[in-house]
Image (cartoon, rainbow, N blue to C red):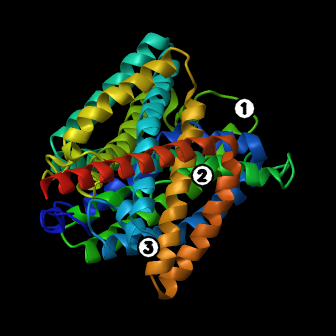
Amino acid sequence: MSGTPTNVLTSMGHLGISRGAALYVGALIGPGLLLVPALAVQAAGPASIVAWGALLVLSAPLAITFAALGVRHPVAGGVSTYVREGLGEDAAAITGGWFLAAVVLGAPAVSVIGGYYVADLTGSGTAVAAAVGLAMFATVLTANLFGLRVSSGFQLALSSVLIVVMAVAIAVALPTRGGHNWTPFAPHGIWAIGTAANILVWLFVGWEAVAQLAGEFRRPEHDLPRAMGIAFTLVTVLYIGLAVATIGVTAGTQSRVPLADLIAVGFGRAGRDATAVLAVALTMGTMNVYTGGMAKLAASLATEGALPAWFAGDVHRTIPRRPLYIYAPLAVLVIVAVLAGIGTTSDLVRATSACFIAVYVFALLSAIRILDGRVRIAAVCSLALSVALAVFSAGFLVVPVAAGVLALVLRRSLRRVQLAESTATD
């Protein structure tokens, strides 16, 4: 691969199995838990449990595929590197553009969602939501500026608190409310299960995020698959319990804070208030993983000539700072725009999902070409799912189309400049 300093990127491993699993959990279990499970129940009723089960089963081959790709290419380029091997330089640049666009749009969206959740629980207004959202973004950005050792430790603490609180809340709610609200099972028809699955997809995006940091595992071939396996097990148990508990507690309601309602079953008013803290942990956990992955990817793309070389000026760092300097004002601008009523968090979430689905399609197409055996079969299954999900993105597919075109034009423009400079030098 042209110019990627693989020896630097892979020789400074700071991640073991526990921190790697924490990053995976943080990538998957995010602020979507605040609202998405209840939205699925509203769409399909108790039959939403079928959508949960189907997505858990179908996410297994996706996790396996990305773990295999991470072991094969434990470098900072992550998905972009995988695509480069199977589909070429242009496709790699396009994929990188999609991932960067997803983070620039998605991280501000989740910070605003978390901010509004806290504001709703505390009876506050937009000013508090804005302050909380911006404070969370600033905290995550600072953690990443200090490097992967700090940010991964931060992630381990957040994930530990999150899993314990959610597990206790679910364990208390299931015996008392788990058997409630199961009839009628499919009040909106069988087709509504597909609608619920489309809503729940947001909770299953994340297996590609840690691929950006695969080179930071001490022993990628050993630690990365085990970290993925631990995370998958934790997420499966948590999601199944959450699905059943959400049906029992929130079915038939239109609450704006359904997770708070669930936790209040076991912890009362104190638990409901504490959900504001949990909302912050959920939000920052997801933002933390994607912020670090974005910075690593941007620096890697710069070394490959798909972004200006300036972005790779501190590529030796566990998390390069230069991409963060550009990312920060862009993200703040998006946050301010949403708070001002220019666009909605729903639009940002759907646009982000469309970008990630596009990333999956290219990464999986490449995986089918470069992998073999059972892992290739897993990639084929995952590709079929990703294409099906793309159909539900509808008009929001214009976002990855625009990001892909911009990435391709930028790469080819930089290429022409490099050739011109080389010719002038000769």
Mark 3 residue type: Gly
In this picture, residue 187 sits left or right of residue 159: right
Where does label 3 land, which residue? 86
Locate the C terminus and report the quarter of the image it occupies: bottom left
Reading the image, the residue beneath label 2 is 201
Q: What x and y, as percent, mark residue 259?
A: 55, 36
**In this view, the mark in front (2 or 1):** 2
Give above or below for 135 relative to 107.
above
In the picture, the disc for residue 316 is: none
Secondary structure under the numbered disc 2 in the rendered image: helix
Pinpoint residue 318: horizontal percent, then vertical percent.
17, 52
Residue most extreme to the bottom: 373
Q: Amino acid at mark 1?
A: Thr
Q: Is residue 383 left or right of residue 126?
A: right
Taking the spot 23% from the left edge, 65% from the top edge, the residue there is: 215
Horizontal and vertical percent for residue 159? 35, 49
Q: Is residue 78 left or right of residue 350?
A: left
- Image location of residue 153, percent across then percent down: 21, 49
Q: Secondary structure at mark 3?
A: helix
First of labels 2, 1 by sequence position:
2
Of residue 97 and residue 185, the one placed in the foreground of this image is 97
The residue that mark 1 highlights is: 253
Mark 2 residue type? Val
Is residue 124 something one can see in this rendering?
no
Per the image, label 1 sits on a secondary structure element best described as: loop
Could you tell which of marks 3 and 1 lies nearer the N-terminus?
3
Cα separation between marks 3 and 1 = 48 Å
